[in-house]
Amino acid sequence: MATNMKEIDNKESTQVPEDSYEMDSRGFACVVLPELDYDAQLLAIRHLLRVHENVDREIEKEINALEESKKNSQGRLCDFFEFEQEEKIQFSVYQSAAHSMSAVGMLAPLMESIFHQGFRGIHENLFTGEQHPSSHIRWNQSDADKWDCHLVWGRSGRKKDLVRGIIQLSDATGLKPFLPEDLEVVLKVLFSYRNKMFHCGFEWPVVERTRFWNRIENESWPANWLDKATSGGEPWIIYLSSEFIQHCIQTIEQVIASFGNFVVKKSGLAQQLHSR
């Protein structure tokens, strides 16, 4: 899958009709992501998410059936159906948490890997000389640091911050204009949730639940990106919504296309493709 820029320039297969330029430029993402089969990963993720959706629908059907049985029964039999329904609802809460952890456990590492490897690929294939694209503070650092999107530089020096590192390095390289406009908030929600789930499990400490849920309003996160089960009216278990999961997949697709468009633009292929 590895391809260098000379090979791309010399292959007649790069002759793309002008009206399909934007669509076909996505394929050039492989120049900076030669060791990552992102399409296969997305296919596998989509498949497992569909399995989870089917399981969730089956549980919902069982809960609704028990509700009907409860309505049509009396006495101890009604109590039995009510108990069974409560048990099933309790189970569905934890099952949804498991599915949410599975989703973030697939989406967050893929997003992180695309950016981490993509920036390394930009360094190796597009910015191979001593000349840097700007006077950004990152270019004063060592190669090992300045191309690492896990790091960010500010007034207080270097810090570890994946989200801010991705945004800062995107700005420094010139990739940022190609990326989705809401990328930063998507990354904040995705990685913040990933960190909470993988450090705290399904049931976070009460203070962590409240603090995280308040971030929706405090940081202007879209209200439909997160769901919750409650206990005593307060957040109990927090999930990624199906809307946000699908939005993450769309964002990953857009990021891949952004890398492809960036490669075409920075390598000079844009003019070649438009002129053919």
Image: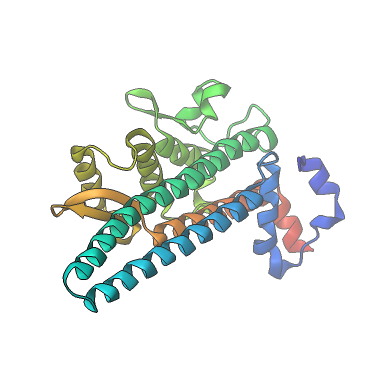
Residue occupying the point 19% across, 65% down:
79
Foreground residue among 271 and 207: 207
Residue 94 visible = yes
The answer to whether 131 appears left or right of 228 in the picture is: right
Residue at the limit of the structure toward the top, as seen here: 142
Residue at the limit of the structure toward the left, as seen here: 232
Residue occupying the point 47% across, 31% down:
150
Residue occupying the point 69% across, 38% down:
35
Residue occupying the point 37% across, 37% down:
195
Quarter where residue 85 is shown: bottom left
Instruction: Pinpoint residue 152: horizontal percent, then vertical percent.
Output: 42, 30
Instruction: Pinpoint residue 115: horizontal percent, then vertical percent.
Output: 54, 40
Q: Which quadrant does the C terminus fall into? A: bottom right
Foreground residue among 181 and 139: 181
Quarter where residue 147 is shown: top right
Foreground residue among 89 and 230: 89
